[in-house]
Amino acid sequence: MSDLNIKTDVVIIGAGPAGVCAALSLLTYSSLNVVVLEQSDFSQVRVGEHVSDSLFALLDYLKLQKSDFPAHCFLPCYGDTTYWGSDLPRVRHAIFSSENASVQLDRESFDFTLIEQLTARGGTLIPRTHCAVSQQDSEWLLQCTHPAQAPFEIRARYLIDASGRNSSLCRQLGGQSHKLDQLMGAGCFFSCKDHTEGAQEQLIESTEYGWWYGARLPNQQYVATFFSDSDIISKLRLNQRQHWLQLLQQSQHLKRLVKDYTALSVHPWLRNAGSQYSDASTLRNYLAIGDAACAFDPISSMGLGFALTSACHAARLVISELEQQQDLMQATAVTQARQLYQQDLHTHFASYQQLRRHFYQTEQRWLHAPFWQRRQAG
């Protein structure tokens, strides 16, 4: 066994925004030791994200300023144009909705800045690590493998699951996962250098087979993504550039917006975008956050904001469990707080389901098509 065997207070699985923000919250507001594990080497393409400017209040809670990020990390979004339920555009300009201002993120710059802050504040990050998780007495035991090191173990008092919507960790440990659909995104990047039309607006366009999303990214690129169910994406062979571009040419509006742009992606990338909810109420010293707890349809624009808020709430709960003196009264309060956290997740996801149903039921033009039939049926 390697000399790297580690004993820590909290281990976090997943170094996306949820996992890293949970670590930052723990390191900022407690004296707990934190280790973050990540399966990838961070080379995976990160898709730009459209978020509310309430993001900056969350960053402020984590003692992060806008100036801590590269200047190009946040691009103001001045509005959006939606072709949904009608061929006529529905346009929203930010000048008429100042309370709901939004920004487009450079996700790579955003994510790596968070990681730099994690290590600067004393957190430990171990990438390219796979682990088998089990409980031993009152501790979590993680048996880890790394391509450049001998196998090693991590023992932790608490486990935070930030492993994302693709993970089955919660179910493996005895929790439950409820999947709502099989939504996926198939997307490509374009170079839009020297083009300004629609530069700071996003576009959403529904079609018979699903819907398109397009947005300018801060690095003089444009992202176009088609969202549909996995079986439809497979049938249309949208993992192949030729078929993806053919479908793009069948759009009415997005194809005109990108007609002078240069496609950068050799092959379309595919991402799981399904909605799901995890119930970990039976697991002790374990909390799921971000997509591992609740994963939302991108049409809701709820993903990143929820990732950060759930991370901060979970961190506060972990601090109360591990740092406070555990007399009987406090132990009861902690148990109630854990139950409330899971109940809040359930309530949040139930509210999201109503919002999702409302979005999709406003589109009535393709009720015969499988994608829309599934969503009309709830």
Image (cartoon, rainbow, N blue to C red):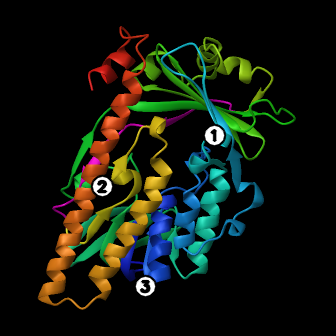
Residue on which the image places disc 2 = 169
* Whether residue 130 is visible: no
Residue 299 versus residue 336 in the image, above or below: above
Q: Position of residue 160 (x, y in %)?
A: 35, 66
Q: Amino acid at mark 1?
A: Phe
Q: Residue at x 60, y 43 (%)?
A: 97
SS label for mark 3: loop
Residue type of the residue flagged with mark 3: Ser
Q: Position of residue 14 (x, y in %)?
A: 45, 60
Residue 158 lies in quadrant: bottom left
Q: Position of residue 371 (x, y in %)?
A: 38, 19
Q: Secondary structure at mark 2?
A: helix
The residue positioned 31% from the left and 50% from the top of the image is 348
Q: CA distance from mark 3 to mark 2?
A: 26 Å
Name the mark on residue 96: 1
Q: Of label 3 and label 2, which has the lower sequence position? A: 3
